[in-house]
Image (cartoon, rainbow, N blue to C red):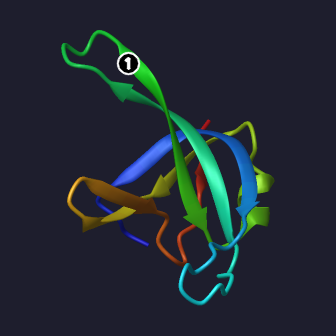
Amino acid sequence: MLSMFTVTGQVMRTYIQPGAVDRQTGEIGEPSSKVQIMGEIPVRGGDAARLDLVTLTVESLKTYAELQGKRVRVPLGFFAPSKGEIIYFIPKGATPEVIA
C-alpha cells in the first residue's frame, strides 16, 4: 500500500476499546482494536524534537501486539469530520514495517 503520509515510532500498547453506546437507541457499537505509537515530532528550529503518543485504529490487534516495544513505520490516513477535529487511522490492508 502506498501512502504519502506515515508515522514512525515505538509500539507502546495495544488494546480493545469497547463500542460506544448510541444515545438514542441504547445500542452498543462494535469494539475496535487500537495501537498506541510513540513518535518524535520535530520542533521549530530543528534542534530538538518532542515525543507524541498517537492512538490508531487497526484491523489486527495481534499484528501490533507482537511488535510491542519495537520501532515501526505505518501508513497514515486521516479525515476531519468537523472543524477542529482530526481522526487518524491506519488504512485497511496496511502492514507495519519494522525499523531497525
What residue appears at the point 37 percent right and 29 percent down from the top-left corner?
41
Find the residue positioned furthest to the front: 24
The percent position of residue 78, horizontal first and vertical second, equals: 34, 63
Task: State left or right for residue 34 relative to residue 78.
Answer: right
Task: State left or right for residue 39 relative to residue 11.
Answer: left
The percent position of residue 87, horizontal first and vertical second, equals: 39, 61
Quadrant where the N terminus sits is bottom left
The percent position of residue 21, horizontal first and vertical second, equals: 63, 76
Task: State left or right for residue 59 relative to residue 91.
Answer: right
Is residue 23 shown above or below 34?
Answer: below
Nearest to the observer: residue 22 or residue 43: 22
Find residue 33 and report its image quarter.
Answer: bottom right
Find residue 100 and report its image quarter.
Answer: top right
What residue appears at the point 70 percent right and 74 percent down from the top-left corner?
31
Q: Using a 10 Å C-alpha cutoff, classify the residue at mark 1 as few (fewer than 14 neighbours), some (14 to 19) or many (20 or more).
A: few
Circle 1: element type: strand
Nearest to the observer: residue 53 or residue 97: 53
The percent position of residue 9, horizontal first and vertical second, equals: 54, 38
Find residue 79 and report its image quarter.
Answer: bottom left
Tag count in the figure? Answer: 1
Task: State left or right for residue 27 relative to residue 45.
Answer: right
Q: Which residue is mark 1?
A: 49
What residue appears at the point 25 percent right and 65 percent down from the top-left corner?
82
What residue appears at the point 72 percent right and 44 percent down from the top-left corner?
13
Nearest to the observer: residue 84 or residue 12: 84
Is residue 10 shown above or below 61?
Answer: above
Q: Amino acid at mark 1?
A: Ala
Nearest to the observer: residue 69 or residue 98: 69
